[in-house]
Image (tube, rainbow, N blue to C red):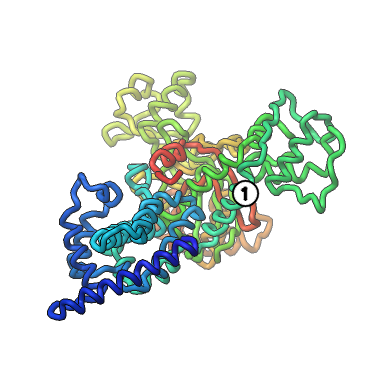
Amino acid sequence: MNFFFKLTFLLSFIVLGILLEKINSNNTKHQLNFSDELKNYLVIRFNQIDSTDFLFAFIKDNFENLKSFYSTNNFKPVIFSDLKSIYIVDSLLAFFEKSNEHGINPEVYNIKVIKNELKKITEPNKSLNEKYSHIINSEILIANSLINYSTHLRQGFVDPTKLFSPNYVLPHRILSDKDKMEVLSTKNKVAFLDSIQPKSERYVRLQNALKRYESIANVNWETISLTKNKIEPGDFFPQIKNVYKRLVLLGFIDTTKFQKLTSNKYEKFLVEPVKSFQKSHGLIPDGVIGKTTIERLNITPQEYVKKIKLNLERFRWYDYTDSSKYILVNIPDFNLRIIEGKKEVSAIKVCVGRKINWQTPILYGQLSHLVLNPTWSVPQSIVQEEILSGLKKDSLYLKKRNFRAYKNGKRVDLSEINVKELKTKKIRLIQDPGAGNALGKIKFMFDNSFGVYLHDTPTRAPFNYTNRAVSHGCVRVENPYLLAEFLLKNNSEWTIDYVKLETGQQLDDKNILAEFQKVRNKLRKNFSYGKTTEVYLNNHINLFIDYFTVWVDENGILNYREDVYNKDIVLEKSLPIW
């Protein structure tokens, strides 16, 4: 509120106080204070509110909870509890007005309606009863907005487990009705609102990015024309100056440190900024300006702002950065990131599920053990989609790939299996360990209802793709030994060298080989199934498979990824925050 309005409002409260004192002096039998007088009006107001009341449209989602709360508390006002409430109201409205810093439109909290009710209290032609009515309306509206604001910051606008059901099973904050009403029960509401502001580094970094991109939202964003030919360093490109300007605006070129571009030549000093930009968008950072790089350069500040707001909402659903050690697979990023002490230790390329029918679910689990030289029990869906076509092309397909076949629990000869037999879905296929095994040399296990796991793969080409949504739902790991080394560190009798030897890798150190031969039988005891063996971790490690299309990394660089499963589109339609 501006100073004049605040002063007028305060004076109006003083007048109300004087009028109340006069009423009390003429009625010594039933003396009331300001709060007691409001109680009576609150009782009357709540009894008046129904679906036809203008107030109901703003508070309908919380109406029953509000009525129950005030009734339980003998209709004692919690906003306008005394004549000094103006100062508290001013502070509360300030929180609502700054909700845009969280990517939320402040009008979600009915600020205009509240201010209109407050303004009416100051109008000189209003009777005492009318002024009290507007105070009560303000009380209820502000209480309602406090519930919504504190709920949105602590659990988000939407319930992702419902919005993305059944493929979202990450832990998600769900506030009870009691939790939601806590903001009204607490004495110091300003301190409470301050305490619930998300404080994780990733959230704050994204808030800062929101400010930055909003600050350039009105800059003329001239479209850079696509080029059929790739532009390499030294090439002439008529729009290279626009590329330079775009990189400056996006923060990839510091004009105080870089020379100015004076020609249409793709100068060498531009290569590193281009590579940095490409890397921030998950592209191959080769410094070559092609169609995809230009498309990403043409993404407008408004689009960045929208993506940031969507991902701020995702960050409000759950904050797992306090976990000292965990694994994060970000589906749109196509990377597995090892986090320890809130710092990224390593990043490993992964392949995730295809967009159509095979999407990798968003989930949480605890990595419990590794399976070395795993067998693969082929799901019927994959048998019907891929194995059938392979067998049609080559009658020896199953034999060449070390499959075993079972019918009614009994093993059958592969020569007896044909396309017609497989179509009946009565044949169960198991692929033995070996060079062509679809799960590679290592499988990483964690409990989940989808049967999803992380695993090695003999199919290496997709790791060079920009879009690595190519699997059947499980997560393929480019460097499984790096992940295994992290998991085994101080967490098992197995070492990474032992794992390498067990999975057929060669080591130059003969001492380690001799050492492993001595302990191998002991290590494999109770966990050996021929070539396959299981390695259990002493302590399980948290794994999050999540979905972020925008985030700010530790170096302060905004990272942008394509919405590979169209989840941004679904979320945007569900958020009333624009």
* Amino acid at the residue labelled 1: Ser
Q: Secondary structure at mark 1?
A: helix
Answer whether residue 146 is visible to the viewer in this image.
no
Q: Quadrant of residue 95?
A: bottom left
193 up-or-down from 125: above or below: below
Q: Which residue is mark 1?
A: 215
Residue occupying image coordinates x 41% and y 38%: 573
Is residue 512 toward the left or the right of residue 493 in the image?
A: right
Tally the numbered discs.
1
Say which of 429 and 81 sits in front.
Answer: 81
**Dot 1, crowdedness within 10 Å: few (<14), some or many (≥20)?**
few
Tell me which residue sits at (79%, 42%) in the image: 270
Placement of 259 over or under 230, stated as above or below: below
Q: Would you say 510 lies left or right of 360 here?
A: right
Q: Nearer the viewer, residue 266 or 137?
A: 137
- Tell me the residue at 77%/31% (across/down): 239
- On the question of residue 446 being in view, the answer is yes
On the image, the x and y values in percent for residue 96 come to 43, 58
* Vertical arrangement, residue 169 with respect to residue 408, above or below: below
Quadrant of the rendered structure where residue 424 is?
A: top left
Residue 437: horizontal and vertical position, in percent? Answer: 50, 38
Give x and y (percent) for residue 31: 18, 78
Residue at the limit of the structure toward the right, as seen here: 262
* Residue 23 horizontal side relative to residue 58, left or right: left
The residue depicted at 35 percent of the width and 43 percent of the height is 163
Outermost left residue: 29
Give percent across and percent down for residue 84. 37, 73
Of residues 201 and 285, the one nearer the viewer is: 201
